[in-house]
Image (cartoon, grey):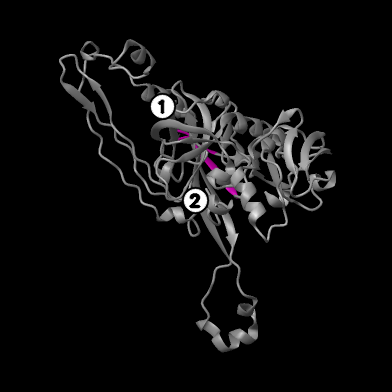
Amino acid sequence: MQTKESYLSNGSREPNNIEYNFSDGKAAKSDNSSWQKPVTYLSLVLLGASVSFAGSYLGSQNKASSQPSISQPSISQASIVPVTPKLEAKLPITADTNFVTEVVDKVGPAVVRIDSSRTVKNDMPAVFDDPFFRQFFGSQLPGVPRERVENGTGSGFIINSDGQILTNAHVVDGVDTVTVTLKDGRTFKGKVLGTDPVTDVAVVKIEADNLPAIRIGNSDNLKPGEWAIAIGNPLGLDNTVTTGIISATGRTSSQVGVPDKRVSFIQTDAAINPGNSGGPLLNAAGEVVGMNTAIIQGAQGIGFAIPINTAQRIASQLATSGKVEHPYLGVQMVDLTPEIKQRINSDPNSSLTVDEDNGVLVVKVIPNSPAAKAGLRAGDVIQKIGDRSVTDAKTVQQTVEDSRVGSNLQLQVRRNGQNVSLTVRPGAFPTAQQ
């Protein structure tokens, strides 16, 4: 749920649109006659990863299109001829069972709907309140309400039986009220324990006991091609299930289009639509491996989720202290490639000259930042951080993120053909930039 401008274009919280399409699956009978099992999917054009607030959310303009369900012919297990015994053993679908329905039956009760609202003040020119101005316009001056209430909807999932719920920060950030609805229809008033806009993770608490909690997986072990199941409330359609695969892992924030975030995203082609924000991305075993959060406008079959290992680490800090401190250096970096080197050296307006062929080029150092205080300069090429050789900015960023505020990080850089060793102490990511 978002309230200002495009979430993916500039880091604010407005949804973006995308459409998802999938193919049919096929198998063969033993009598050599082919059969086909059609699979239908929800195809929607959307503008974000959560249902937009009324009034200023563009997502409210989207329309959901649905497809009729198609009954499937019953096929006995004896009539199915596997392609190979090895392949048959790996597929979780058989004639008598469907792994998706089993996952949904098991996990569905732990997925919740989150409705929120907040009061927004309208900015009015001061001249409208000027008595002299009103003397001429009087009752002809249109009345503009001072405040308005904006509503939004997102998803979440229960991470423990005592009522802690994980969702996206943009779903509940800055709201006045939060209402959590369980699958069985019960509703609870939610309390926001904390939000972290840097990773887009938030924790909400409801007063309830013995709740169905989701099982946590390990996102570090994900591989492209694995099954992916998304459950959420897209466009207000509660308990919607979509399936696909893990398309890629380790997508950087810049690749996704949210450079202000600090997340190495999971990419999936399971449909993610407005209202899915904060819902779980599951594997074939019914374990949550990610939290659905974003899409790219104009693309098809490209959605993104926050790895559950990241979300769980942030959630633990939010539940304990209500905030998260992210270490930062205060530099802008770029992977040094032959193309980048040639472009910089051939630019007559560039103040940089690059002599190295490998490493991470420091393009800019923020004044008064930890990097500036440590003596790092624009044009330096980072080649090692700690004992780790680096060739991409992602590695530098992850190493900093894994460090602690105030700890010492050793950097080895190349400057004007010379090796330079620096010690930098990461500071806390400035609140004003979140």
Three-letter amino acid code of the residue under disc 1 = Val
- Magenta span of residues: 176-188
Does the magenta segment cover residue 185?
yes
Residue in view at x 55 percent, y 54 percent: 3
Q: Quadrant of residue 271?
A: top left
Query: Which numbered marker is on residue 104?
Result: 1
- The x and y percentages for residue 368 are 82, 51
| In this view, 103 is above or below 417 | above
Neighbourhood count class around disc 1 (C-alpha, 10 Å): few under 14, some 14–19, many 20 upward: many
Residue 155 vs 141, above or below: the answer is above
Callout 2 amino acid: Pro
Disc 2 + disc 1, Cβ < 8 Å: no
Task: State the residue at coordinates (28%, 14%).
Answer: 82
Q: Bin the neighbour count of mark 2 within 10 Å (Cα to Cα): few under 14, some 14-19, many 20 and up.
A: many
Q: Position of residue 56 (x, y in %)?
A: 50, 59
Circle 2 — which element?
Answer: loop
Q: Earlier in the sequence, mark 2 or mark 1?
A: 2
Horizontally, is 180 left or right of 106 in the view?
A: right
Residue position for label 2? 15
Vertical position of residue 399 compared to residue 148: above or below: above
Relative side of 48 to 79, left or right:
right
243, 115: nearer the viewer: 243
Residue that appears at 48% across and 52% down:
52
Asked if residue 184 can be seen in this view, the reply is no
Q: Position of residue 340 (x, y in %)?
A: 62, 47
Residue 399: within the magenta? Answer: no
Point out residue 286 in the picture as x, y percentages from the top left corner: 46, 23
